[in-house]
C-alpha cells in the first residue's frame, strides 16, 4: 500500500481506512512519515523494515497473514514505482496469500502541485517519463538516461541524486542548458526543500545541499513561465459529448453547454 510522498493528509481515503484497521503494520520506517504509522490502532503490531531484507519482510508478512491477521505492508509513495512490488506479490501468491494493492500519490505529482505547475503543456510537452539513473540496480540499455532524455519530455528522475553529475552530463546532450529542473527533497514533509534551477546548475545545486537520497528531479520545458498556451478541451470551438462546438469568437456559452467535459475527451 502506498503512503504517498510524506504528508499524512496526502494519503488516499482507502489507505487511511486500511491503516486504521490494521492488526499488523509492516512499514518502511526510513521513508514513511511516522505520523502515518501512528494512524494504526494502539493494539497493532508495528514492524519496521529499514533493517530487514526482502526475505525477512516477506517471512513476517506471510506468518502474520497465515495466522489470520490483517496485515498492511506500507510503502512510501506509490508501491508500483520502485517498490519491489512484483517480487512481493509473486512470493505471497506462491504461499496462497491474496493481496490488495492500494495506490499512493507519487513524489512527481506532489512536486508539480507544490510548484503549481502542469507537466503537460499544449504545444510544449505532452509526455511524462518516470525513470532513474542506473546505479547498483542498473537499467536496461534501451532505458538509459540518454535514451529517455532524447524524447525531451517532462522527465521525472527518482533515485538519481548520488549520480547527479553523470545524469546532468547525459541530459545536456539533449536538453538546452537553460531547461528548468525542479529539485525536490522530501516533498510534502515539514522539512521540504524545493527549487527550480537551469539544467546546467543541477549537479552543483544538489552537491551544495548534500542531496543523496529522497530527492526527485523534474526536467521539463513545461516549468518555464509562459502565457497564451491553452488546451483545446475547454475551447468554445471544441465539440464533445457534453458540449456542442461554437465559433472561437462566440461571446458566451449557454448554461446547458457549460458542463465539464468527459474525462475521455481529447486534449
Image (cartoon, rainbow, N blue to C red):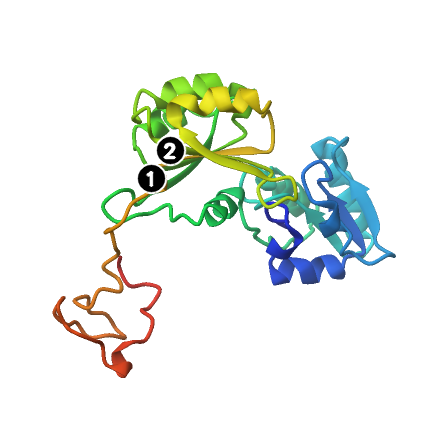
Q: Label 1, on which residue?
A: 224
Q: Residue furthest right?
A: 43
Q: Position of residue 153 (x, y in %)?
A: 33, 37
Which residue is found at the position 50% from the left and 44% from the top? 111
Quadrant location of the C terminus?
bottom left
Which residue is found at the position 60% from the left and 40% from the top? 192
Check disc 2 and report its element: helix, strand or loop.
strand
- Horizontally, is 123 left or right of 145 in the view? left
Q: In terms of image quadrants, where is residue 181?
A: top left
Which residue is found at the position 44% from the left and 50% from the top? 116
Q: In terms of image quadrants, where is residue 213?
A: top right
Which residue is found at the position 20% from the left and 76% from the top? 252
- Horizontally, is 152 left or right of 63 in the view? left
- Pointer 1 with pointer 2, Cβ within 8 A: yes
Mark 1: few, some, or many residues within 10 Å (few <14, many ≥20)?
few
Between 21 and 248, the residue placed more toward the observer is 248
Q: Which mark is residue 180?
A: 2
Residue 133 drawn above or below residue 120: above
Amino acid at each position: 500500500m502506498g503512503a504517498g510522498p510524506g504528508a499524512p493528509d496526502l494519503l488516499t481515503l482507502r489507505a487511511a481506512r486500511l491503516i486504521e484497521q490494521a492488526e499488523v503494520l509492516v512499514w518502511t520506517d526510513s521513508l514513511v512519515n511516522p505520523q502515518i504509522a501512528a494512524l494504526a490502532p494502539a493494539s497493532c503490531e508495528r514492524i519496521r523494515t529499514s533493517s530487514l531484507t526482502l526475505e525477512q519482510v516477506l517471512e513476517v508478512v506471510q506468518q502474520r497473514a497465515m495466522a489470520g491477521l490483517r496485515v498492511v505492508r506500507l510503502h512510501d509513495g506509490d508501491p508500483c514505482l520502485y517498490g519491489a512490488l512484483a517480487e512481493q506479490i509473486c512470493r505471497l501468491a506462491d504461499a496462497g496469500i491474496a493481496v490488495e494493492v492500494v495506490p499512493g500519490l507519487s513524489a512527481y505529482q506532489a512536486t508539480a502541485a507544490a510548484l503549481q505547475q502542469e507537466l503537460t503543456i499544449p504545444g510544449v510537452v505532452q509526455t511524462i517519463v518516470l525513470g532513474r539513473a542506473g546505479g547498483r540496480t542498473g537499467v536496461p540499455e534501451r532505458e538509459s538516461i540518454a535514451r529517455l532524455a532524447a524524447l525531451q519530455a517532462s522527465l521525472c528522475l527518482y533515485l538519481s541524486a548520488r549520480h547527479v553529475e553523470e545524469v546532468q552530463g547525459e541530459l545536456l546532450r539533449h536538453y538546452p542548458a537553460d531547461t528548468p529542473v525542479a529539485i525536490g527533497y522530501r516533498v510534502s514533509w515539514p522539512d521540504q526543500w524545493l527549487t527550480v534551477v537551469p539544467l546546467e546548475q543541477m549537479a552543483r545545486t544538489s552537491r551544495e545541499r548534500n542531496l543523496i537520497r529522497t530527492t526527485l528531479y523534474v526536467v521539463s520545458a513545461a516549468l518555464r513561465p509562459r502565457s497564451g498556451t491553452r488546451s483545446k478541451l475547454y475551447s468554445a470551438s471544441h465539440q464533445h459529448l457534453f458540449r456542442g462546438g461554437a465559433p472561437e469568437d462566440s461571446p458566451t456559452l449557454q448554461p446547458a453547454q457549460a458542463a465539464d467535459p468527459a474525462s475521455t475527451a481529447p486534449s
